[in-house]
Image (cartoon, rainbow, N blue to C red):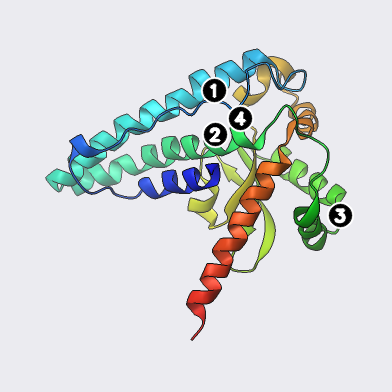
Amino acid sequence: MLSRAACSTSRKLAPALGSLGSRQKYTLPDLPYDYGALEPHINAQIMQLHHNKHHAAYVNNLNATEDKYLEALEKGDISTQIALQPALKFNGGGHINHTIFWTNLSPNGGGEPKGELMEVIKRDFGSFARFKEKLTAVSAGVQGSGWGWLGFNKEQGRLQIAACANQDPLQGTTGLIPLLGIDVWEHAYYLQYKNVRPDYLKAIWNVINWDNVTEREDAGNSARLRLDVLRKP
């Protein structure tokens, strides 16, 4: 499942052990749809550049940075390990975030979630309309580049909205399990919506893949149940 793949990616960003030769390189995931499949809401040119250029750059830079990090780790070069942390966070976060983002979108998306996810949204935000309004406002309010997120707080067992700057990964920086991410870097919308971020945010709701968000919420609940079991005396 793609949510497990994202968790695996996050885990690999921790200091790796073993030889350089045995490390498996990160790769650019294929999109589950054609570049033009999200039109007219997100055009093909944006999707191609976003996936094949921007996401690919994060993957390539992550591999190069991790090679340097592992070399420094083998040499016991702590100064270099520390110096490489920002690049690991930026490029690793970019890879994690976009891997989630592509699956959060679908040409058959839009509308409203159903079943348990809708009930949880109503419980935690009052209504779907209020949730949508809040996530849109948080995403619109990101200064510069970043992401708006719907996450699952497994400690509290509730949904939570958050914003992350740049490519900071949600789980790595807040502890929230990522369910739905909205990329508000200009490369995600500028070629079609220019600098009018609110128009892009209005359009993206038409391609949200609620089935994928539901799968991620189910996985988050499972993680919480495991945590509860571990806490029992």
Q: Residue at x 76, y 59 (%)?
A: 120
Mark 4 — residue?
Answer: 185
Which of discs 4 and 1 lies nearer the camera? The answer is 1
Could you tell which of marks 3 and 2 lies nearer the N-terminus? 2
Mark 1 — residue?
Answer: 51
Q: Is residue 40 above or below residue 103?
A: above
Q: Nearer the viewer, residue 59 or 190?
A: 59
Q: Amino acid at mark 3?
A: Ser
Q: CA distance from mark 4 to mark 3?
A: 28 Å
Could you tell which of marks 4 and 1 lies nearer the N-terminus? 1
Task: Answer whether labels 1 and 2 touch (C-beta < 8 Å).
Answer: yes
Q: Position of residue 210 (x, y in %)?
A: 73, 42
Q: Position of residue 123 (x, y in %)?
A: 80, 63
Which of discs 4 and 2 lies nearer the camera? The answer is 2
Q: Residue at x 44, y 29 (%)?
A: 58
Q: Amino acid at mark 4?
A: Trp
Q: Residue at x 45, y 24 (%)?
A: 56
Could you tell which of marks 3 and 1 lies nearer the N-terminus? 1
Q: Residue furthest top?
A: 45
Mark 3 — residue?
Answer: 127
Would residue 57 appear left or right of 45 to someone viewing this image? left
Mark 2 — residue?
Answer: 98
Would residue 125 appear left or right of 151 to someone viewing this image? right
Could you tell which of marks 4 and 2 lies nearer the N-terminus? 2
